[in-house]
Amino acid sequence: MSYQLDFAGLVPYLPQFAAGLWATIELTVISTLGGLLLGTLCAQGRISKDAWLRRSCSCYIEIIRNTPFIVQLFFIFFGLPALGLKLSAWQAGMFAMIINLGAYSAEIIRAGIDAAPKGQWEAGQTLGLTRRQVFWHIILLPAYQRVYPALVSQCIIVMLGSAVVSQISVEELTFSANFVQSRSFLSFESYMVAALVYLLLAILMRQTFALIKRFAFKNPSL
Amino acid sequence: MVQFTDWDILKNLLLAARWTILLSLLAFAGGGLFGLILTLLRSMRSKITTRIIQTYVEIFQGIPLLMQLFLTFFGLSLIGIEVDAWSAAVISLTLFSSAFFHDIWRGCIEALPKGQWEACRTLGLTYLQTMRYVIVPQAMRMSIAPTVGFSVQIVKGTALASVIGFVELTKAGTMINNAVFEPFKVFALVAVLYFLICFPLSVLARHLEKKNHVAR
Amino acid sequence: MSLVSLDQVHKYYGENHVLKGVDLKVEAGEVVSIIGRSGSGKSTLLRCMNGLEEYQKGAVIVDNQSVENDDYKLRLLSRSVGMVFQNFNLFPHMTVGENVMLATKLVMKKSSAESEMLAKELLEKVGLADKFSAYPGNLSGGQQQRVAIARSLAMSPKVLLCDEITSALDPELVGEVLKVLEKLKQEGMTLILVTHEMNFARDVGDRVVFMNQGRVWETGQSDEVFSNPQTEELQSFLAAVR
Ligand SMILES: Nc1ncnc2c1ncn2[C@@H]1O[C@H](COP(=O)(O)OP(=O)(O)O)[C@@H](O)[C@H]1O
Ligand SMILES: [Mg+2]
């Protein structure tokens, strides 16, 4: 009953935590960039004139949004090799995170696009721009701006979700915590430390995005 | 080694899916109840309570659910309460959902125009009467769609209970796969079953959302 | 003693000094129009009369009750002071009848039957007897505003505060709301209205208060003020709105 928490016992394992943290940051940065790009392309696909493209984009979005991330991860890591697509744990984790964020952000970005006044499309096209040019040059930035808070939250959710890739032995923060607790037997303490680091990462991400916002959207909010 | 036909695989997955559904229902009910209590407490407008609840929400939204499961599992045994994977999963999913439910419902209450409060004040209604007859009924109507939407997150969240050893759909999938070694088929089936649970909920949430918009 | 009396009322929003010592007395049965540019403090002034806004200095006394920031006192005050808002603020999830009856039941503690009778009577007065079971969302703006008036009247207030209650209406619907106000005046109701309807203020109102920069800049009998404005500010304001 009178268990004494022993955080000092974790000090020798700091390098493990640091390595895990670094990997988590790497995963997060790459998957955020990749996921937002994929999501943007998909959002564009959703409003394409090509019915087949529209349908495949919504299929992808629905499948991802309605299945657990861990199952997606297992399917990619364990299942895809059957199709001859063999990925390392790191690659599989990265891939799963990108695909995951891609689907969620596509839906969010599309909401931003839908909210664009019709006149914006028309104005662009009267200037002689193609539909694609209007999308990339006129519609997209304000769309991001409209849904920015939702996008930020989603990116943070995906960062937190990266804990799950420890389950295919990607050596990120949660994996480190698992490793440390199996060595030190300080399980609660290890997970507390990891949890705290995630919490800080989430706060840090919010602040980074707030900073990006200041540079990206020069016009006053819509 | 026993021979598994496709039918055996599916049957075992379906049996395990019952646990996924049960766990989801418990988390939904527990999280809903607890989230409701948080929302009520917060509507008492005490600065300290608000601050505490805000922190609670920030913590549960800022830590991976997987980490929350580990902490519950190991933390409870640390203070001398031996928990099995099942209780740990129910407890942490309940806490997790309560934070999100509270956030959703508070958002609905705050989304109501200030004029509704002012009208009640000029009519001489008390704070509780205002809540009971004017604010809550409207907020409730608004909150149905996002609440259903979040239930999808709960179902998906239950998959993480597999990591602490609770045998639900995902865990059953890994176990069966270890026996038959057909990962493509097994995990595809697992995904399909989740999809069959979640997709109707998503569609319902979207439908309700649209109805809400039309009603405004 | 006047029904409404403001004595050197000061109001700040942070640094922003919005009311700079307002004096105003309104007698029972008077119809007072408050006019002035946007941002001159008209709404704030009105909202200080029923406690929706706190003021920092001075005194507001309505129906012999001091208006203070105290929930209980403000609830008592709500029986003396009614308010109608620019955007109606009806309760969209309740029928018209329920909107009108809510406070009579909960605050006045009248029985259901009594409340219903009163509600029907009031809806009759504002010309909406047939809308008792309709929902606000299915009514026109003018109808909604008349329901809002009926809802305030249900508390049988001594004075009714109206903040630009025709500003959100399509022009063709303004008349029906103003007609209700005229009727209330004939019945002896005290009205204090912030309004842009200068014709109404001149023809129906007894007195006009011109607010400028947080002060009562000029005030007097309606016809007087409109035909012979004294200050340059009122002259230019009237020239602009005409
Ligand atoms: N809730 C508020 N917070 C801060 N400033 C306010 C608020 N409401 C009004 N103000 C300021 O008070 C001043 C008077 O506003 P108001 O009474 O609404 O003017 P009017 O009704 O004559 O247009 C304005 O400068 C306005 O910006
Ligand atoms: Mg105003």
Image (cartoon, coloured by chain):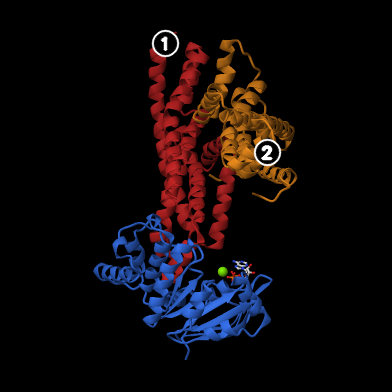
Q: Is residue A98 something one can see in this rendering?
A: yes
For the residues tagged 2 and 1, is the chain the same?
no
> Secondary structure beneath disc 1?
loop
Q: Is mark 1 within 8 Å of ligand 1?
A: no
Q: Which chain is blue in the rendering?
A: C
Residue type indicated by callout 2: Ile
Within the displayed image, which quadrant is ligand 2 positioned in? bottom right
Vertical comparison of C242 with A15: above or below: below
- Foreground of the two, C241 or B175: C241
> Secondary structure beneath disc 2?
helix
The residue singled out by tag 1 in the image is B4
The residue singled out by tag 2 in the image is A138
Q: Is residue B27 something one can see in this rendering?
A: no
- Foreground of the two, B14 or B132: B132
Colour of chain A in the image: orange
Q: Measuring from the top left, give residue B185's x and y in whole percent.
A: 49, 14
**Point 56% across, 62% down: residue:** B47
Vertical comparison of A33 with C45: above or below: above
Q: Which chain is red in the rendering?
A: B
A18 horizontally vs B2: left or right:
right
Residue type indicated by callout 1: Phe
Chain letter, disc 1 residue: B
